[in-house]
Amino acid sequence: MENLLKVALAQIAPIWLDKAATLQKIENTIIEASQQKAELVVFGEALLPGYPFWLALTDGAAWDLKVNKEIHAHYVRNSIQIEAGELDTICEITKTHKIAVYLGIMERAKDRGGHSIYCSLVYINELGEIKSVHRKLQPTYDERLTWAPGDGNGLQVHPLKQFTIGGLNCWENWMPLPRAALYGQGENLHIAVWPGSDHNTKDITRFIARESRSFVISVSSLMKKEDFPSNTPHLDEILKKAPEVMANGGSCIAGPDGEWIIEPVLHKEGIIYETLDFNRVYEESQNFDPVGHYSRPDVTQLTVNRERQSTVKLKDE
């Protein structure tokens, strides 16, 4: 039925800062979800190849500290360059298994020189096509020491059966104007991706659902002290201050009435499944629609610049 969508929340840990191994784990997870008849699978923020936990553990703001430079270089080397075809296998799997994917990656963007990295949320449709790459608009706090700020190009929505889906990275979900940009394009299934932990997901997931009268899927990763690979640069330095658990999950789903469909799931690695009924969107928007009958565009409007930003624009003869 076109109004029903089976979704899969992939709450998994990366093989931290190991691009090849994490790619393999993601590919296996997509296949597993498709075998359970899921039509959309969502992964956490920066899962490929992992969140920069070291910044809070190694005096990350210190100038010219060798340990941070070397870990950063390792991070960049293990980030994804889409133009080089590094997501091609995932695209082929989604096409073969007819499943759509939202995937959080670290993107080493060729159109920005290839040396800086962006926290990007990639949408791949069921035909294996990359339809949008949303670079996080504003990295949060210590993230700014290793991630570059993105642009509005990825503030896009996509059709999937009767649903219109869009997504944001982590604390972007607290930014009213990017949310409104997606609502105004008809979003009714909002994807919020996180590095992990219910302190992020437990409030905002229900808030966005109630504000937008949409389904909201929050997906978080997991990360424990034991998940750091032994070949991680300066591993001993990282582990000195690392807590046993850095990301406890917290993946969840809220319905268009703002109530839980699946409450935050903690400390459990695996795939969480649920079937969503689009009709509930229409039911809950009967009395409130923030960009429809309950809006006043004659008073307030939002302008969105979706141009992909680049330092150099080449005009070849």
Image: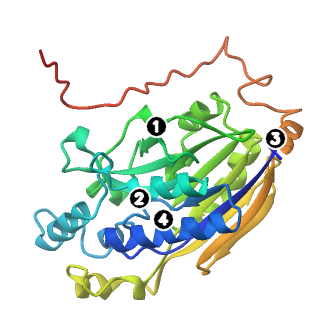
Q: Is residue 192 visible?
A: yes
Q: Earlier in the sequence, mark 3 or mark 1?
A: 1
Q: Residues within 10 Å of mark 2 (few under 14, many from 20)?
A: some
Q: Earlier in the sequence, mark 1 or mark 4?
A: 1
Q: Quadrant of residue 296?
A: top right
Q: Which residue is mark 3?
A: 281
Foreground tag (1 vs 4): 1
Foreground tag (3 vs 2): 2
How far from the left and from the top, in percent, is residue 138? Answer: 40, 45
Asked if disc 3 and disc 4 are in contact, CB closer than 8 Å, the reply is no
- Quick check: 139 left or right of 103? left
Q: Work out how far the residue at label 1 is from the one at label 4, CA to CA, in angstroms.
A: 19 Å
Amino acid carrying label 2: it is Thr
Q: Earlier in the sequence, mark 3 or mark 2?
A: 2
Amino acid carrying label 1: it is Gly
Q: Residue at x 61, y 76 (%)?
A: 270
Q: Which residue is mark 1?
A: 154
Q: Is residue 61 visible?
A: no
Q: Residue at x 63, y 66 (%)?
A: 33
Foreground tag (4 vs 2): 2
Q: Residue at x 21, y 65 (%)?
A: 72
Q: Earlier in the sequence, mark 3 or mark 4?
A: 4
Q: Which residue is mark 2?
A: 89
> Which residue appears farthest toward the front when viewing the image?
96
